[in-house]
Amino acid sequence: MSHNSFGHLFRMTTFGESHGPALGCVVDGCPPGLSLRAEDIQTYLDKRRPGQSRFTTQRKEPDQVKILSGVFEDERTDGPRTTGTPIMLMIENVDQRSKDYADIRDKFRPGHADFTYQAKYGIRDYRGGGRSSARETVARVAAGAVARKVIPGVTIRGALVQMGPHKINRVNWDWSEVDRNPFFTPDAKAAAFYEDYLDSIRKAGSSIGAVIEVTASGVPAGWGAPLYGKLDQDLASAMMSINAVKGVEIGSGFASAELSGEENADEIRMQNGKPEFTSNHAGGILGGISSGQDIVVRFAVKPTSSILSTRKTVTAGGEDADIFTKGRHDPCVGIRAVPVGEAMMALVLADHFLRHRGQAG
Amino acid sequence: MSHNSFGHLFRMTTFGESHGPALGCVVDGCPPGLSLRAEDIQTYLDKRRPGQSRFTTQRKEPDQVKILSGVFEDERTDGPRTTGTPIMLMIENVDQRSKDYADIRDKFRPGHADFTYQAKYGIRDYRGGGRSSARETVARVAAGAVARKVIPGVTIRGALVQMGPHKINRVNWDWSEVDRNPFFTPDAKAAAFYEDYLDSIRKAGSSIGAVIEVTASGVPAGWGAPLYGKLDQDLASAMMSINAVKGVEIGSGFASAELSGEENADEIRMQNGKPEFTSNHAGGILGGISSGQDIVVRFAVKPTSSILSTRKTVTAGGEDADIFTKGRHDPCVGIRAVPVGEAMMALVLADHFLRHRGQAG
Amino acid sequence: MSHNSFGHLFRMTTFGESHGPALGCVVDGCPPGLSLRAEDIQTYLDKRRPGQSRFTTQRKEPDQVKILSGVFEDERTDGPRTTGTPIMLMIENVDQRSKDYADIRDKFRPGHADFTYQAKYGIRDYRGGGRSSARETVARVAAGAVARKVIPGVTIRGALVQMGPHKINRVNWDWSEVDRNPFFTPDAKAAAFYEDYLDSIRKAGSSIGAVIEVTASGVPAGWGAPLYGKLDQDLASAMMSINAVKGVEIGSGFASAELSGEENADEIRMQNGKPEFTSNHAGGILGGISSGQDIVVRFAVKPTSSILSTRKTVTAGGEDADIFTKGRHDPCVGIRAVPVGEAMMALVLADHFLRHRGQAG
Amino acid sequence: MSHNSFGHLFRMTTFGESHGPALGCVVDGCPPGLSLRAEDIQTYLDKRRPGQSRFTTQRKEPDQVKILSGVFEDERTDGPRTTGTPIMLMIENVDQRSKDYADIRDKFRPGHADFTYQAKYGIRDYRGGGRSSARETVARVAAGAVARKVIPGVTIRGALVQMGPHKINRVNWDWSEVDRNPFFTPDAKAAAFYEDYLDSIRKAGSSIGAVIEVTASGVPAGWGAPLYGKLDQDLASAMMSINAVKGVEIGSGFASAELSGEENADEIRMQNGKPEFTSNHAGGILGGISSGQDIVVRFAVKPTSSILSTRKTVTAGGEDADIFTKGRHDPCVGIRAVPVGEAMMALVLADHFLRHRGQAG
């Protein structure tokens, strides 16, 4: 069962609510002997942290991670190392702004999980969305940082490739550009455009969706498994588990529906003594197993439903009502989904690396 | 671990290869007391069965299912009933046409799993694709038929909504049309068009992709779970596990990336004493939990790589080669993915129904 | 979930009832490339097969196993090899003697699962015990034979060490004796005694319990895991899952409750350059992880409840009644538990070998 | 996979080391709406807490639990309630006495997990045993307290029934006596005897084993499942996962090996309109499913290996050595296993209650 856990051999279990004392996760199954310091994790948390530009929520959270178990250092070793036991990572909440929650206590915000949590559980922690808040993704990013240590030969990079209807121009793709703009987009021209575009959305109190692409280079052929442990299946599961994600595709994805068999099937040639594919419509996965090419995943993030317009809803008591969501929000929550998508990719790959090693040595 | 199993409380484990003696599955966790006869399952197998029109593979398989365990009938009951123990469903292979496999034994077919199975396992059953053959989906459809028994109030229906670049016109949507054309499409006009379109592809020895939509009506609010047991996450996993699927989306899916928060968030009004959503961009799922609206999933199926053109590849020995795939194939394998997608929807929902009942009574 | 599955990376899912058409299992996660023929499995099934002496049930079952998937042979290989895909093993039932089940249909046999299955499921396949029959263990033995292939350096041997109150004399222990008597006991003198002893029980229509010991030699240090994947924990689970088992112990087991710390803790000395323990109270497991010593497990098997005496019970309708179990039965069902215990040991070790390799390389 | 998790629908994942900053667990799958305060948990932690008599380790740990997620209280509710989301329970370590660990850093303590952790992981947190310390059981007791909330109709009680070779006299059994002596034993006369007996062992710097019995009353017929989800199987797994446990038995356990079928099979009679068993050799479980009788489990706890005698061992470097374990220890660690055994019983039953409800409504 996996209600709050993800992965099998490399497994993360998360806990915590938006306005509770802390969030975090237990990472189980990590190989022993890996160097791991809090700062290795902090790097990725900082990338995800809110409030770094005017384009993300203004909640101020230092998001300092503490490693509470699973690493050990003694005077003979060169720093802390994983011991193979559970690694507990905790991030304390700081900026739980005190406010009046009466409005969202009794009304269901359209597009939010308020209605469904209430239907399922009969009770919900409505403060800031509770468990359904995007704040939970801090735990994913922390666990993802550990996962990267497990697969050092793999390079995982994410990028925003579409905001609203505006796709980047792939000709301009430059990975180094991703860290130079607040949108994690690899197209400098698109970044310039998004700045004005998102400003207008933000000022209007509205929000917009986005598409994120995450790639992994250096994955050897052979990870993944038929038929219900497919690598692409687990990637789809991973990305769809991120808040606000509504679609996932691998390689050519939905576009492959429009292709002929001749166009779609990637041919193979020997190059430098190794088989190389001449294209990558498959996104690096055939039959659920990695082919050695880059793994390419894209996912669509819907616009935040927390907007400054009055919306029609109903109350818990069963009456029509209007609701108006005050407070801090992300005009394009897809931006901060970039480091989260990278983390989920890392978690899937670390798990499959161990699973492959288990079965096939 | 789930390499060949799917689901948790309601769980299917499949086995068998394309050219082995039999395929099938063990369905575990089925509630007791449900009426179950082979013919209940056969109905769905017949819908998926190959060779029913010129638009699917001409392999002749009766696909007769046998129930080898898990049901019991005595003179006091009105027919066989599930006992709560594992239900083993077996379908024997009949038309394993004897042929010369030397070509695919030594060469990797582009777009197939040949290359990755070999890389992972160092051995593969190359006859007809072995375990990676779409023939495995017969087990899914059989298990799905049992799953439907678990959730009798839910109606699951699938349809082909796009073939190649040609989408249906949703204005023409008529569910009853789906069973009247060989494409499982709900748009009679599109069906007429597809007939000529696919004939030309078939005669050219080519193939084409498709998009399938599966909906479930009658799912109550509350199924699913945060955060790694999300209903949409498990649906994404389910659909992506089907052979040749490259993308999955829920509700507005990728289109939601282009929407504003105002457009995307479904408002709620009281109607007949119950909350009703005024739109369904969410596809019936909020925060990973069903909202009571129709569950709507779409997935993209790539074109079959088995085409009658010569393709560039390499041999297992590491030499460049050409390959030409003879024999029977599906010009649009997406067609037969319709009953498979329905089955996967049924499996996810039956599992989540039991999981919800377990936790929340 | 594991209602009818056992293991994680090396995983068996069983199906079938005593009087259904067939029993068997799907073995998932088996490493690829292992030589596997039906006769490799048959050897162990033959050891467990009923009707081989007057001391086991006289049901005549050939128990011929068929391998229906997961192995592949071509003209270039030296026989069938596992492919890494699910191995389906099926044993057809032959001697489902037609009889009148009316008595056990309406009455609960004391000491049987009749009462609890009815309470849980509201329906039960009462023919020969259905799913609760010891006949299910045929699937365990088949899967166990595959598991042995995964850990070729490990020798697994089982023996009956107690029948009723009569323990063997460990001074007489001779493994080669186990195959020379119908009790699988390593003490020739005990075997001679058991022959008369069990004859008298059998003729009286009674039954008696037993204790079985299973050891594994050649397990390297390091298999198993803290804290809920302990090797001894999984062995306890494995043995307690066998029908009629009521107790499990590791190493000194219950006797260790009577020992002092000095007596119980096995000391270590270097021998031939390697650490060697000077005793094995631990049964080869410390902290849930193998120490390199022999793994030693014992389990208690209760006497069959199918006896030729009239017993007090109640009917499904809620009335007091007497019941008299006719037909074939095992006077000491513990005998046939020996190969079953060996199989469960093999399953646990194969799984833990793969799990260890996954995490720690 | 379950290396550091236990249970399925009701699932605990533990973390933390003996001398790290904190230990604790994440409890997942808890039903919503249950009243849960820290003091509900503290009651059980206090029972297990060390240093309460001279018969347990003198380490001083307040063992104050904090609930960091998964409960919610607002002004309309009568106190905090579970929300159905993960409940994180944390206990900070306080008395990590600074000491010189050089001796156990380089030498393997006989009877400890030092040797096997090193063999498995190549690294270990040797301070106080790290993850293998009995201190981990604090997390089990905390989770067990939550589990009890899930099954309010069930009464779970544990007792020490044997210390060294000295069994209690069951004629004297008085549950209320358990809380009146430092041994959790229900026989006042035995308690008096144990006081002197254990004092002499303690003063000699030695240690002794014990047997613990845990019973659950009020479990309805029908919990558990064939064949690898047996209630007794999961209880065996649960108890064997506790540090130092070497044997587990259900009902008559190993004694049933000595019984005839007539003696062992519990007969049934109608009483007050309900079926009642006239004895309970089965320990409340038939065919892996609860019968409605009391569930009865016993487990053997080996003596602590931390004793004040010099012992023979080897160093990590491969040399013979002597070791002498200084410091605080439990002369009979079985005593504190009583609340731990109760907790594990609660965890198994809560999980099986939810699993049963999931499958069979």
Image (tube, coloured by chain):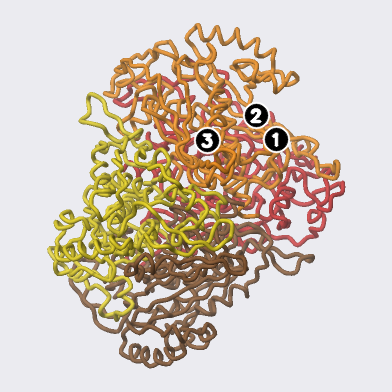
Chain colours: A brown, B yellow, C orange, D red
Q: Chain of mark 2?
A: C
Asked if C333 appears above or below A252 in the picture, the reply is above
Q: Chain of mark 3?
A: C
Which amino acid lies under the numbered mark 1 shown in the image of this protein?
Ser
In terms of depth relative to the viewer, which is nearer, D325 or C220? C220
Q: Are marks 3 and 1 in contact (CB under 8 Å)?
A: no
Q: Chain of mark 1?
A: C
**Mark pair 3, 2: CA separation:** 16 Å
The x and y percentages for residue B56 are 28, 53
Determine which residue is flagged by label 2: C157
SS of the residue at dot 2? strand
Which amino acid lies under the numbered mark 2 shown in the image of this protein?
Arg
**Mark pair 1, 2: CA separation:** 9 Å
Task: Check disc 3: other Cα within 10 Å, few if <14, some if 14-19, many if 20+.
Answer: many
Q: Are marks 3 and 2 in contact (CB under 8 Å)?
A: no
SS of the residue at dot 3? helix
Of mark 3 and mark 2, the one earlier in the sequence is 3
**Mark pair 3, 1: CA separation:** 20 Å
Determine which residue is flagged by label 3: C143
Q: Quadrant of the C terminus of chain D?
A: top left
